[in-house]
Amino acid sequence: MRIQIKKAARRLTLYDDENNPAFTCAIALGRCPAGPKEREGDGKTPEGRYFVCVKKIGKFGPSLGVSYPNERDALRANAPEDLTTCIRERAERGERPPWGSFLGGEIYLHGGGAETDWTAGCVAMNGGDARTLYDAVPLGTEIEILP
């Protein structure tokens, strides 16, 4: 099972274990969606390979945490070596990366509506779609976010 997000198309697709599309829905992105997320507060949605690191019911309903930042994000931003090492080690253990650094964090796939780009960098969808995805996806599921 894996999740693929195509930012330009504003589409999320969940693929089953045989790599067949099992679910698809419309999405909204960060308020400045072009390009990969670079830092806290830039309003961009990340691009790259991540995994579901948290599942919770949050402000916008059922929510799946994205393991942003990953090691590639840290290297691209010239993050300090200790932060990059921490990010890599947590990813190797399947844990949530450190959130709250200058790179940002707390990126979720959640509800709240998919009509227009409005998030601080998260991927939003309609509430029923968020519930369907939340119920179907276990922790550790791969997330690929494409431009």
Image (tube, rainbow, N blue to C red):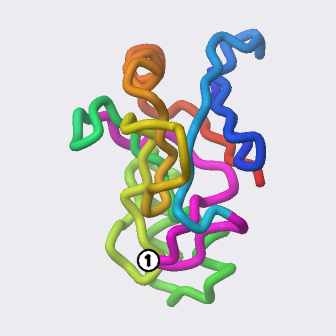
Q: Position of residue 58 (x, y in %)?
A: 23, 40
Count of numbered circles in the view: 1
Q: Quadrant of residue 138?
A: top left
Image quarter hosting the C terminus:
bottom right
Relative height, residue 130 to residue 92 (above, below): above
Residue at the farthest front position:
115
Location of the N terminus by quadrant is top right
Q: Residues within 10 Å of mark 1 (few under 14, many from 20)?
A: some
Q: Is residue 129 above or below residue 63?
A: above
Q: Which residue is mark 1?
A: 40
Residue at (62, 14) in percent of width and height: 23
- Residue range of the region highlighted in magenta in the rendering: 34-55
Taking 131 as reference, is 30 above or below it?
below
Q: Residue at x 71, y 66 (%)?
A: 34
Closer-to-camera residue (10/65): 10
Give the prevailing secondary structure in the magenta stretch.
loop
Residue drawn at the location 39% of the way across and 49% of the way down: 95
Q: Residue at x 44, y 56 (%)?
A: 119
Q: Tag 1, which secondary structure? A: loop
Q: Position of residue 71 (x, y in %)?
A: 60, 67
Report which quarter residue 12 is drawn in: top right
Per the image, is 101 magenta?
A: no
Work out whether residue 130 or residue 3 is closer to the camera in this orientation and state it. 130
Residue 25 image offset from top left, x and y in percent = 61, 24
- Vertical placement of 105 versus 108: above or below? below
Question: Was residue 46 drawn as part of the magenta stretch in this picture?
Answer: yes
Q: Amino acid at mark 1?
A: Glu
Residue 4 on image: x %, y %: 69, 34
Depth check: give the residue in front, 115 or 91.
115
